[in-house]
Image (cartoon, rainbow, N blue to C red):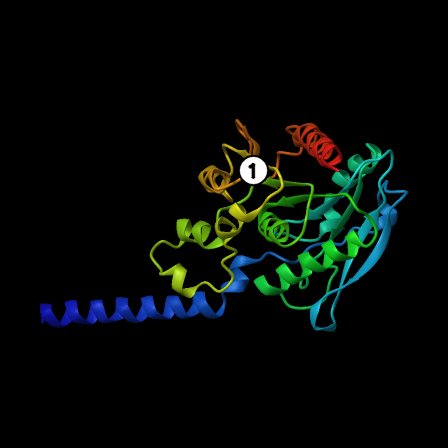
Amino acid sequence: MIKRIVIGVLALVVVLYIAGMGVMYFKQRDFEYDAPGKITALADTALTDAQTVTIPTTDGQALTGWYAPPRDGKPVILFYKGNSGSFSFEHARYEKWTGDGYGFLAFDYRGFPASPGTISQQHILDDALAAFDWLKAKDGRIVVWGRSLGASPATYVATQRDVDALLLETPFDSAVSVANDSYWFFPVGLLMIDQFPSDRWIGKVKAPVFVAHGTDDKTIPLPHGEKLYSLVSNKYGMWVEPGGTHTNLWDRGIWNRAKAFFDDAEKKVIAAQ
C-alpha cells in the first residue's frame, strides 16, 4: 500500500511538472512581457518641438513614436524603451533631453500600447532596426540608449548599424538567464522562445559602451549587468549606483553621466572624421 501511494504521488508530481512546463511554453509571452499601459498624449507634455511620427516596419506594419530634432550641434538619442507600458510614459526624460539641446526618437514596439501588432523577439529587433533606419534618413549623428528590455535590441542594432555610442541602463546578459533565476526548476533554455541573447551580440559592438545599474535592482539583478559589461569590447565605463533599483536611476542622476558619455563619444567621432 505504501509503495502504491509513493508511486501515485511521484506520478502526480511528474504530471504536474509536465503540465507546468506546458503552461510556461504556451503562455510564456504573457509571463515575459508587460505591454498594457496608458498612452500619454504629446499635447499633455512640455515637448513643444516634438511631433508624433509613424515608422514603417516589417510585414506592412507601422510604429508610433515621438521625434524632436537636435539643436546646437548635439546628436539625436534613439531610445529603446523597457518592458512595461508605453514609451510616452517617460516623457520627463525626453523633456530634459530636448531642453539640453539633444534630439530624440522614442516609440512603442509592436504590441505595446501605441503600436498595433504582436510581440515577439523578432518583431522587437525588426522594429528597432526600422526606427534606426528611419532616424538615420533624418539625422547623421545617433547615440543609442536602451533601457531594461530595450537594452537588448539596442545592443543588436549597434552590431548591425554604425552608432556613435551605446548606453545600456539596467541591462541583462540574456533574458533566458534572468528567467532562470526565477524558474530554475524548469529547463527554461529549452522552453524559452524569446531569449534576447545580448551576451552573444555585445562583443561585436564597435562603439563605446556605458552601462548603468543599481545594487538593489530586483527585476534584473546587478550580476546580469556586470556579466554583460565584462563582454564589452569597447568599454567606456560602468556606473553601479548603491541603492539603485530598476526604476530610480533617472532620479539618481543617470542623465548627467549620460551627457558626459555622449559628449566624449561625439568628440572622438568628430576627431576621427
Along the line of sight, which residue is nearer the eye, 68 or 133?
Answer: 133
Q: Residue at 40% across / 60% down in the picture?
A: 189
Res 14 quadrant in image? bottom left
Above/below status of 138 relative to 212:
below
* Place of residue 11 in the rendered image (x, y in percent of width and height, measured from the top left): 23, 71
Res 249 quadrant in image? top right
Count how many numbered circles sit on residues in the image: 1
Picture quarter with the N terminus: bottom left
Q: In this view, does 134 lie to the left or right of 85?
A: right
* Place of residue 255 in the rendered image (x, y in percent of width and height, measured from the top left): 70, 32
Can you name the residue that lies furthest to the front here?
Answer: 273
Element carrying mark 1: loop
Above/below status of 108 relative to 60:
above
Q: Is residue 236 left or right of residue 137?
A: left
Q: Residue at 52% across / 40% down in the picture?
A: 233
Along the line of sight, which residue is nearer the eye, 18 or 118?
Answer: 118
Picture quarter with the C terminus: top right
Work out whether residue 120 can be spotted: no
Work out whether residue 191 can be spotted: yes
Can you name the residue that lies furthest to the right here?
Answer: 48
| Neighbourhood count class around disc 1 (C-alpha, 10 Å): few under 14, some 14–19, many 20 upward | some
Determine which residue is flagged by label 1: 234
Above/below status of 231 relative to 53:
above
* Place of residue 62 in the rendered image (x, y in percent of width and height, measured from the top left): 76, 66
Three-letter code for the amino acid on which mark 1 is drawn: Asn
* Place of residue 209 in the rendered image (x, y in percent of width and height, measured from the top left): 59, 38
